[in-house]
Amino acid sequence: MNVLQAIVLGLVQGLAEFLPISSSGHLILARAVMGISDEAAATGAYMMLDVLLHAGTLLAVVVVFWKDWWSILKNPFKSKTLLLLFIASLPALAAVMLLGDVIDSFFTGWFLGVSFLITAVFMLIAEAVSHHDSRKAEHPTFKHAVCMGVMQAIALLPGVSRSGSTLMGGVSSGLNRKSAAKFAFMMSAPAILGSLIFEGKDAIELGYLSELALVPTIIGVIVSAVSGYLAIRFMLRLINKVSLNWFALYVALLGLIILVLQLAGVPFLPAFALPAVFN
């Protein structure tokens, strides 16, 4: 792994994690475009790098919403937000525990084009629903948390955007776009943190840390954190102004291109991809 590869992967992870286009899907594509083979992608160095790149995006979530996190930490037992985040995390946790092997089987490249098309449909629905009723709720409730949590579970599939899916779940259940986007971004923190604990523990026990190139790794994590920060700020600032149909068009075209290439027998997608918990 060199510095350029780390920068590209960090940039892709940071931007795609919070734009409704799927970070896992784009990381698969980025590795393929850079010619990273199945064998190389499956090594401890790249697996550990993927874990640390997600730590970068977690840092971005912490920095952007530091006031909310501080409020939660000061009164954790009285925090409604913490309770809702816990509720919203349960569907994905249950899916991983019960269907983890099944979900991981989709991370072989063949399902990627279909998943991008699913994300496109979700974005079209979110755009249509968000303008259907002007009396949208400004604060998430139990109903919103459950709906967004279910959508986060669906987004475990590679190429299905977690931020896009949860955003659709929020607006479809009556939450306004900006509040849905904010809660969707905050929802990523428990998921990423939990994944870091389990995946990081396994990586350390297997000695993957020793395989990392220090300088490229540090640069990749910094790029992931900075680009993630900018992506969150961009979405929060423009969520009520930008049409989600543009994101839908992008991932739809990407999905169609992938399907055409796959049907043509072009072996451009690596068999290895991220664990289901990272999407």
Image (tube, rainbow, N blue to C red):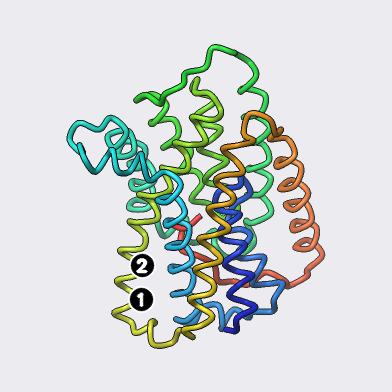
- Amino acid at dot 2: Glu
Mark 1 is surrounded, within 10 Å at the Cα level, by few (under 14), some (14 to 19) or many (20 or more) other residues, namely some
Mark 2 is surrounded, within 10 Å at the Cα level, by few (under 14), some (14 to 19) or many (20 or more) other residues, namely some
Q: Which residue is located at x 75 percent, y 39 percent? A: 246
The reply to whether dot 2 and dot 1 touch (C-beta < 8 Å) is yes
Relative depth, front residue between 50 and 118: 50
Residue 274: x percent and y percent? 50, 65
Q: Name which quarter of the figure residue 109 lies in.
A: bottom right
Q: Give the farthest residue toward the left.
A: 77
Q: Which residue is mark 1?
A: 203
**Residue 199, label in figure:** 2
- Amino acid at dot 1: Ala
The quarter of the rendered structure image containing the N terminus is bottom right
Residue 184: x percent and y percent? 47, 39
As helix, strand or loop, the secondary structure at mark 1 comes to helix
Q: Which residue is located at x 56 percent, y 32 percent? A: 168
Real-space Cα separation, disc 2 to disc 1, in angstroms: 6 Å
**Residue 182, label in figure:** none
Looking at the rendered structure, the number of numbered marks drawn on it comes to 2
